[in-house]
Amino acid sequence: MTRFLFFVFSCMLFLFSCKENKENDDFANSEDYQDLLLGIPQAKIDSIQKSEEKKQMVLHKVSYELDSATSVDFMLPVSNFIKDYSFSSKINLLDPNTSSEADYSDYPNIISVQNASSDSDSDELLLIGKSNNPNIFPVSDIKKYNEAEKILFESKDALMFIDGFGRKKLYYRIYNPTTSIYYLYTAEVPKYNDQKLQYASLFSIYKKAQNLLSFDKETAAENLSWEKVKPGISTPEMENSNVYYKSLAKELKYFLKNNDSVNINKDKMQLYLYRDEDHTKNTFDQVTILGNSEFSGTFENLNFQNRLFPGYFSQIYDSDDEFKFIKKINDNSILVKATRIGYSSDTVTYYIISSIKTEKGQFYLISPTNENGNDLRSLMNDYFSKHLKI
């Protein structure tokens, strides 16, 4: 009797378990679960994708030394730059369970692709290597070695998916048979609170990966302007940058008085805005004077009243460090070079200084830039100095 009751009880447990598993499977395959994974309706996702696809990215050429004998070129949006990266991608290229026995001879160099509008390091990586195998790191392996809860898009060389933690990821591969060089673009989208921004970022990164070798789309440096670059900037990039420039506009309008200043000093977003009381009273424009005089000397040799050194540069330089006018960018902005004299070597940094005149007084906006004064920050600052917005 006892054995019979145990048998009946076991059968009931089995049937209940089967029913529960079926219900779980049914829910996992249901529209409600798929909508939960996506976060927003599919129609909205499709609309975001079309919007990002229409944007014409303004690209510039970037060079990277693969090894002592090989340098490679590729294209990135002008809002992006690269830096060395010492960690692995968040997308598994090899079987994570057997990687200790894997052959790493074909494993690529890893470069971090940075965004000038973000506050921290991104999870966008470009992996470049050499191999005689044109099918190295195929999409089929990426699917096998990574948990894909929901595949958003798949092709022979691309995979977009959502993992078990809701993270949106991208894998994209290019193989150049002429050089036997392969390019792998991997990304994990930042966890923006707004799902729409996550998808906008994902599709923008995908388009960026597609244009890695689009050398025919390069825009000449002398033709760059914020008006040309802005239409190709992704929605998340614009929103990130707008936060800071809207803050500067409020400071200009409501808060900066006398010789007040505001300093936004992030890793990739350095903006110093100050008001000059003497220049306001005397209708004096330091940018114009520096440009017309083509000044070259030291900070202590600046022969007119100014707050350039005590207000900003004294935080970085000594008064006997070198300061030199390089060129006029236009009537509002100039490019200057500052050199910190060191014991064994000197450190050179370029800055854009923009003049801003409003009914509230004379202001100046300063940011580090490149040697040509045409990086994204420079383009934004110059535009802001004229329109008080980007």
Image (spheres, rainbow, N blue to C red):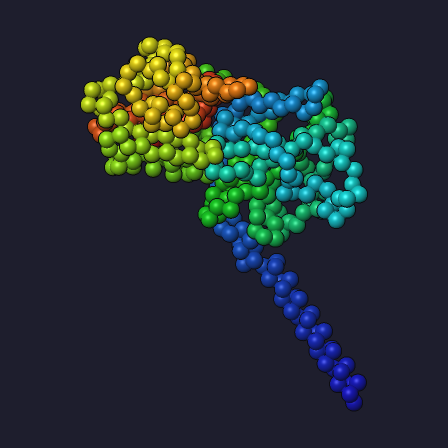
**Which residue is drawn at the image coordinates 73% and 42% (left, top)?**
94
Nearer-the-camera pick, 375 or 347: 347
Residue 117 is at least partly visible in this image: no
Q: Is residue 15 left or right of residue 302?
A: right
Task: Point out residue 382 in the picture as x, y percentages from the top left corner.
Answer: 37, 24
Nearer-the-camera pick, 57 or 382: 382
Task: Point out residue 18 in the picture as x, y percentages from the top left corner.
Answer: 69, 70
Q: Is residue 88 above or below residue 378?
A: below
Q: Is residue 371 left or right of residue 325?
A: right
Nearer-the-camera pick, 243 or 348: 348
Task: Point out residue 244 in the picture as x, y percentages from the top left corner.
Answer: 38, 36
Judged from this view, the residue extending furthest toward the bottom is 1
Residue 340 is at least partly visible in this image: yes
In the rendered image, the quadrant that contains the C terminus is: top left
**Which residue is drawn at the image coordinates 47% and 32% (left, top)?**
268
In the rendered image, the quadrant that contains the N terminus is: bottom right
Judged from this view, the residue extending furthest toward the left is 281
**Which residue is drawn at the image coordinates 59% and 48% (left, top)?**
162
**Which residue is drawn at the image coordinates 58% and 42% (left, top)?**
188
Task: Point out residue 40 in the picture as x, y percentages from the top left corner.
Answer: 49, 50
